[in-house]
Amino acid sequence: MPWEGQRVRLRFITPDDAWLHVRLSNEPDVRRFLGPSLNQTEVEAREALERVTPEKDSLYVIELISDGTVLGYCGFTPNRYVSETDMLISLLPEHQHSGFGSEVLGMLQSAWLGPLGNEECFATVWPQNARAVALLKSHRFVKVREYVDAFQQAHHVYKSTRESLAT
């Protein structure tokens, strides 16, 4: 790591990125798809990120290659409601709807199914997040199941396979 795409690069998240974690964790436009705010302080976020290491975690900051502007974060994360590892992409509202999500999803999907050696990858999305659903479908993800979380919100689980990526 880092990985580079056409316009963005991914670098491992550090405690200095606590501000980003707090902003995304509390951003109403982001939280409406994830549930209630975490109400996490920057100190709490910094402490949590101090426990994150490249050897055991997969959380990356998304930056513009051109000038280093931080767009959001992404990675592979366990999901307490499903047994598989989920891909996570969370962009700051001012950087949404600019194609960055598609570029990052393609990078994560290719890495997970390619060099990281997995046969399938998963992404969980709130069904009302029409743009995220369309993005997943455009990258050949198919809905495989649904679940209801602790906040009584329904979520859909989408899957992509090495085989579907090759066709």
Image: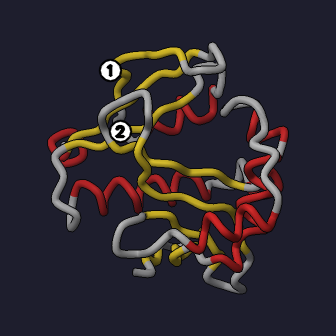
Q: In this view, does 2 lie above or below 102?
A: below
Q: Earlier in the sequence, mark 1 or mark 2?
A: 2
Image-quadrant location for residue 78: top left
Q: How crowded is mark 2: few (under 14 residues within 10 Å), some or many (20 or more)?
A: many
On the question of residue 7 being in view, the answer is no
Would you say the residues marked 1 and 2 are in contact, meaning their CB atoms lie under 8 Å apart?
yes
Q: In this view, does 101 lie above or below 151?
A: below
Which picture quadrant has residue 92?
bottom right
Looking at the image, which is closer to me, 138 or 27?
27
Residue type at mark 2: give it: Phe
Return the mark for residue 144: 1
Q: Distance between the residues labelled 1 and 2?
A: 9 Å
Where residue 65 sits: x, y (%)? 61, 82
Residue at 70%, 73% in the rendered image: 17
Name the element at disc 2: strand
- Location of mark 2 (residue): 122
Q: Quadrant of the C terminus?
A: top left
